[in-house]
Amino acid sequence: MNQQRIDGGARRAVFAPVDSRARVDAVVRRIGDAIELGLLGDGEQLPGESELAGQLGVSTVTLREALMALRQQGLVTTRRGRGGGSFVSLPEAPGEERLKVRLRGWSTEELRDLGDHWAALSGTAARLAADRTEPEDLVQLRRTAEELAQAQDAAGCSRLYGRFHVELAAAAQSARLTREQVALQTEVGALLCLVLGDGEYREEVSERLRFVISAVQDGAHESARELVERCVRESTARLIALRLSL
Amino acid sequence: MGLATAMLDKAPEESVAARVRSAVETVFDAVAATRADTTALLERVTAEGRRPATVDLATLRPGLHLRLARHELVSGVGFVAAPGLLTDVPAWLEWWQTGSEGDVRPLLLDLDHEHSAYADYTHWDWFALPRDTGERAVAGPYVDYLCSDEYSLTLSAPVEVAGRFAGVAAADVYLRHFEAAVMPMLHQLPRPARLVNARGRVAASTDPRRLVGSLDKGPDFAGALATGRPGRADGVRLVPCEGVPLVLVVAE
């Protein structure tokens, strides 16, 4: 599609401030519709996160959740590193199939590296949290582990799994680790839907998270780190196994 | 008798605690003004025989913008509605922040449980403490990944209309700004000192072995705050910053 021929006014409207209440939904629909309508072409790069959030008048947290939803729908793909960013990708198949297509875009080396980064963030967060956590900090983590055990679908479970790791970084009292974790979860969250669809594995995850919380509560920093690293490694291993089967 | 004269009679720790307290009180002034505006607004709406909606809260904005501009320590300010207060939305934050370029911008969160794992804000200390105690509160230091991504203190106070809890008025202070304000005060003391919240979390420190964000697990800080009087414990002197839930801890 030749972008030069697309009407400038309509394109500007795509990036006009969103004022609806369900903001993630509004952003997802706005960009999703624009893609379906061809206002944004296949392969076109979206503006950077902070610029896009500013233009749409939403917070970066909201934008990231919207981008995550768009990735789950297979409408946007994110490439990292030099020349990276979020790119429009035209849908070809629904739901899980689209996610598998996304997963195929990752090499096993990239997935392994993603898992290493995640384990480093969450492992360090767990160790620090064990030193710095007082009982009230654990309330949120417990609530998340409980909600995760009750979650009905993979997408909801993946959001809660992500929230657990973000809350753990916050319990470590580190704004940097927390920001890194939020960014990492927007990358890995969509993919994790593929492995969290398995109800037995969801139970295992919530059990593992409870052990992490207990270790943090006991101030057992090395075992807190080890337990959360093991949990992350298992999730990554499942993703890689699935990737190898595709 | 002026405040300065009164301070001359006190031990240096008590004078520092009093100065920390006044710094925090300036932020509570912003909270109190927001609370007063919100209460007046909600009472007016009630008097008109209807329930408030998000559009009514827009009248708070000039005041919120003014507070962001005037109060050096305040980086975010607003009113957070109790779920169910407003007729058109289940939950709402009328919240404004200073952006990185000094601009003032609204915080727009997704409060739809279907899409966001962060839609429920009622468990955060800055909301739960004023709701449960009816008193003003200082939450943190904590990593505020909901609103600012910053390590912060949030000061808040309950807003009540006809005796019913309607939400909280609150203001955010980023820890780095708080530190810049109180460190010169702590440095006036001859020995390492730190400010600690009721749960033992260090909010500022001139002691390299007791860093900001760490947990001081020794003395009973909540107890010290409850008495409101200076005391001693485990080789340290504890001086509550009267009226503000922070304790000045000085090595003896």
Image: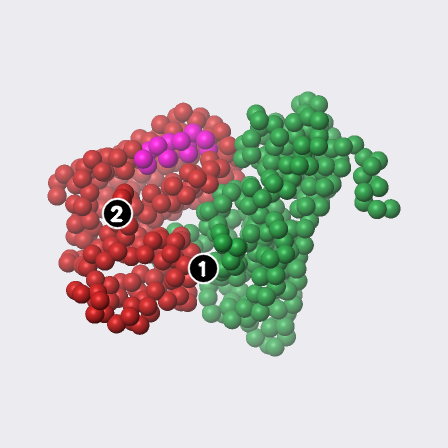
Furthest residue in direction bottom, as rendered: B48
Picture disc at residue B26: none
- Residue A182 rendering spot, x and y as whole percentages: 38, 45
Q: Circle 1 is placed at which residue position?
A: B108
Characterize the magenta stretch by its predominant secondary structure.
helix
Question: Within the magenta stretch, is there residue A88?
Answer: no
Q: How many numbered callouts?
A: 2
Vertical comparison of A49 with A111: above or below: below
Q: Is residue A107 above or below residue A215?
A: below
Residue depicted at 51% across the width and 48% down the height? B124
Q: What span is colored magenta in the figure?
A: A117-129
Residue A104 in the figure: left or right of residue B229: left
Chain B colour is green
Marks 1/2 in contact by CB < 8 Å: the verdict is: no
Of residue B159 and residue A81, the one placed in the foreground of this image is A81
Q: Chain of mark 1?
A: B
Depth check, front residue: B213 or B207: B207
Whether residue B186 sits left or right of residue B59 in the image: it is right
Quarter assignment of residue A236:
top left
Dot 1: within a 10 Å radius of its alpha carbon, few (fewer than 14), some, or many (20 or more) residues? many
* Residue A151 can be seen, yes or no: no
Q: Residue lying furthest left in this view?
A: A246
Residue A12's spot in the image, x, y percent? 33, 68
Specify the amino acid type for callout 1: Leu
Quadrant in the picture for residue A118: top left
> Is residue A125 inside the magenta stretch?
yes
Q: Position of residue B204 (x, y in %)?
A: 60, 36
Q: Residue at coordinates 54% horizontally, 35% vertically from top-left?
A: B213
The residues tagged by marks 1 and 2 sit, at their Cα atoms, a distance apart of: 29 Å
Q: Please give the label number shown on residue A83.
A: 2
